[in-house]
Amino acid sequence: MSTVPDTRSAPVWIVRVTWVLLAVVPGPLGDAVADSGRTAQVVFTAAAWSLWAIGVAASAWLSPASLTAIRCIAPAVSIGLVVATLARPNLADSAVLWPLVSVALAVVATFAAFLPDYAAVHAQASAYGAERRLPLRIPIPHVAPMLLVWTLTAGAVSGFLFSLAGEVWLLAVPSGLTAIGLAWLAATRLHRFARRWLVVVPAGIVVHDHVLLAETFMVRAHAVTSVRVVDTPGEALDLSGVARGALVVVSLREAETLALSPYLARMLGTLDAVHVRGYAVAPTLTGQALAALTKPPATT
């Protein structure tokens, strides 16, 4: 099986095309800052074009890092365009049509970037040899903290931009340092979720998940007795982190040692290393995962 990602995937091209069109369609930013000072116009225009350029690069270059980037940037651009549209001095005139189109394009790009198929293409782009990388669903307990980190970061960056635009230099320095610190925290924290995969290789099956596991867990193909889709993990160790939807349970011939992250060990109330005869994971694309697991890729 080739590890070359399927760039014909519809979500990939939806994100690419809509993002490029954002530079073509007249947006609301110009009108929103028209009556502001020159500094504000330069700051917000430069910020808008910087975000757009990063989005273009992230949509063109497929990788887990670019997946994290586009999923962080696209919602911010959508919200920014909505705010800029509402801030236009003549919101009711006919010229508001194009700003609304730009908002719609950003929303479509954001929606497509969060589709499971889109993440799968980015994950496969980083695969080696005959690997098949299958993204795992985000555990429900982590959704709220992720949204909080993203919101705090977006707020800090916005505060920095507004302090620059208003030429409040004493506020710009601490707000800028805060924005940089939160952006680094958000990037490192959120990126872990773009690198959670169930990996099928000719030699066996790998769970790559630094959120729930202390180290990558691999079992040889001959050690697997069955793979099935279930609603609950049953006696298998739940490595989904409490994710919504169907689970894939991998049953093993003999007990294997699995190292848990401190978070999962606390959640399960157990030691940081356990012996398991089976485990359950939650791939975003359950059908594709089951097909890959029941028919491992051939060596290239």
Image: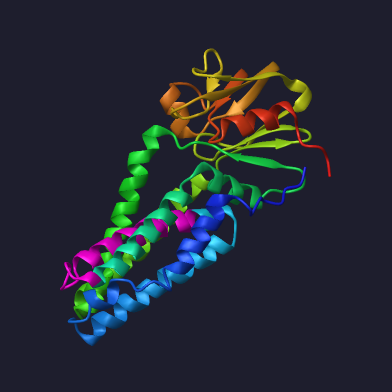
Residue 295: percent from left, percent from top: 75, 29
Q: With respect to residue 208, does 223 lie above or below?
A: above
Residue 74 picture quarter: bottom left
Residue sticking out furthest to the top: 235
Q: Identify the residue at horizontal 81%, vertical 37% (top origin).
A: 298
Confirm whether the magenta stretch covers residue 76. yes
Quarter the N terminus occupies: top right
Say if 209 sits above or below 259 in the image: below
Q: Is residue 196 above or below residue 55?
A: above
Visible residue check, residue 178: no
As drawn, is 13 to the left or to the right of 4? left
The residue lying toward the viewer, choosing from 21 and 149, is 21
Part of the protein shown in magenta: 68-94
Residue 140, quarter of the rendered image:
top left
Q: Image point 16% across, 72% down: which residue?
A: 90
Determine the residue located farthest toward the front in the rendered image: 94
Identify the coloring: rainbow
What residue is drawn where x is 43% and y is 73%? 24
Residue 188: image location, x then y, percent? 46, 53
Tell me, yes or no, whether the highlighted magenta stretch contains residue 40: no
What percent of the width, then of the height, locates residue 168? 19, 78
Residue farthest bottom in this picture: 38
The chief SS type of the magenta part is: helix
Residue pictured at 68% horizontal, 48% vertical: 127
Residue 272 sits above or below residue 189 on the image: above
- Residue 128 at x, y = what percent? 73, 49
The count of marks equals 0
Q: Using residue 207 as the reference point, say whether residue 261 is left or right of it.
A: left
